[in-house]
Amino acid sequence: MSYDPRSSHLFVLIHGLWGTPEHMESLRQSFKAAMDPRENAVFLLPSRNAKFKTFDGIEILGYRVLLEVCQFIQQYNEDNKDGRQIRRISIIGYSLGGLVARFVVGKMFTECREYFRGIEPALFLTMATPHIGIKFFNPQHSLWRSITNPVLTFLGSNALGKSGRELFITNSYNDTLVRLSSGEFTEGLARFQRRVVCANVKNDRTVAFYTAFVSEYDPFIDTQNRLNYTFEQGVPGTGYSGILPRIVDMDKLDPADMRVVVRRPRTLKQKLVLYVMIPCLLVVFFPIALIVNISGTIYRHVATSRYRRMIRDGDLPSEFRERIGISSRLTRYVSETYESIVKESDDPNAARNNDVGDDDDDDDDDDNLSMGLGQHIHDDKASIVAAEQLEEEKWNTFIDKYSSVMDPRRDWLGRFKKLPFDEKRKLIVRNLSELEWIRVPLYVKSINSHGGIVARRGMNEDAPPTSIAAVEFVGKLVSHLVSSMH
């Protein structure tokens, strides 16, 4: 495995709706802790799309992120006096940030190809991202859901700005997700050596399993999440700070194996929460939140009207290129920068030559001591190598299994019904499934697993143990994948 000491690997971590860069800090810490130092990892957490700006629509959000990435690369490459340059890039998106990431990778090698010449796309990963958009299903024909689903759809597609309309794919003017599943966008994804999606199996009240998993199947919606879980045995990775990550073995899911729900009498505290606190929140907090979101939608609609006109007229790409200063001068600069970098071949005999000694005058006792010490070191090295090989086999087995989890021949797919997708969503799934994905079904025991899957509030004592384990696992998975690319 060879590393170029003058090559840096840029990781771009993109937050989601209503988010801030701080929401990606736990992932950054996990990546940094797990990464081989020789990877020379550098991190960019784009900051120009925070809070209400996330309402502006995927294209505008994507161009803002792309602008930050291009400026970061140029500044980094110019500032490093030791000649170190960004030569690899990985992009990680959380929630809506995963859709923004897909827009970015589509434009990287077309409108911004001058900046990314000589940069190798390594890893593309999303966490709880609604790749197929958001749509509420009611397979059990629940009266409650029959009432609430249309209400939530109306609110989500009208109170979250253009981003909300795009997430719900309300009409042909807001079919960005359909366009993201073809052309330059899937071609950009195909350039990455690995693609990974991570999905919550439970309590993600924002992004359902099926849309994060890129699947027409959702066993958890289909059974009102009453399935018995069997967690993956022998999860790869070592050095977890607490419990092992809980990854659901999809092959063991069976609609005939359901959890028995025991109805216990509610305690006084539970009754207070149910009959007092929740109604108070609905009466007081919900109207305030609704007013804030609608106000934000109106404000962002006005603030981005110029950019939306430019998108409609096809003028935004040229405006963007002018903004980042792509010109013949920049093209020449980028070309000269990367053509001047020549990889130095490592001399495999260098270390051996430095360690060779030629003192033949040692006595027999010294020879025996050296032989004994050498044997001990040899045994330790053999143990380490054996452990590394075992861990490598575990990772390979895991990756092979979850790269083919949506193979039609897998038994679990035959046990559950397909969701009734419309033609647009069927097209998205079909197009994205032409690429190979590692699909990871994570169990995070939390009231809000959507935030827990990235430990949005930090990896501290208040974070659920399953949340910390999930973030640590993703860090180790990313480290393994990028290391195996060398």
Image (cartoon, rainbow, N blue to C red):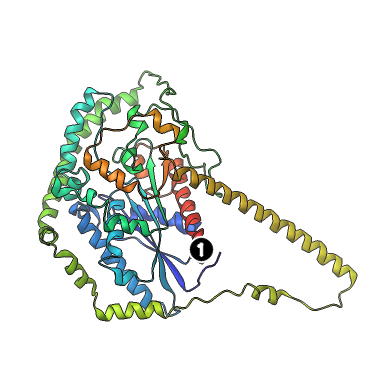
Can residue 283 be seen here? The reply is no
In the displayed structure, 29 sits above or below 75; it is: above
In the displayed structure, 456 sits above or below 89; it is: above
Q: Where is residue 419 in the image (x, y as percent from the top left)?
A: 29, 33
Q: How many labels does the image show?
A: 1
Q: Where is residue 390 in the image (x, y as percent from the top left)?
A: 61, 49
Which of 381 and 349 lies nearest the eye of the viewer? 349
Q: Which quarter shows the N terminus? A: bottom right
Secondary element at tag 1: loop
**Quadrant position of residue 71:** bottom left
Q: Which residue does the numbered mark 1 point to in the structure image?
A: 486
Compared across the picture, whether 232 is left or right of 46 comes to right
Residue at 14% over, 54% down: 300
Compared across the picture, whether 204 is left or right of 315 comes to right
Which of 303 and 6 lies nearest the eye of the viewer? 6
The residue under label 1 is which amino acid type? His
Q: Position of residue 193 (x, y in %)?
A: 42, 58
In the displayed structure, 363 sits above or below 65; it is: below
**Quadrant position of residue 378:** bottom right
Instruction: Rate crowding at label 1 as few (under 14), some (14 to 19) or many (20 or more) other CA atoms within 10 Å.
Output: few
Can residue 486 be seen here? The reply is yes
Q: Position of residue 4 (x, y in %)?
A: 50, 71
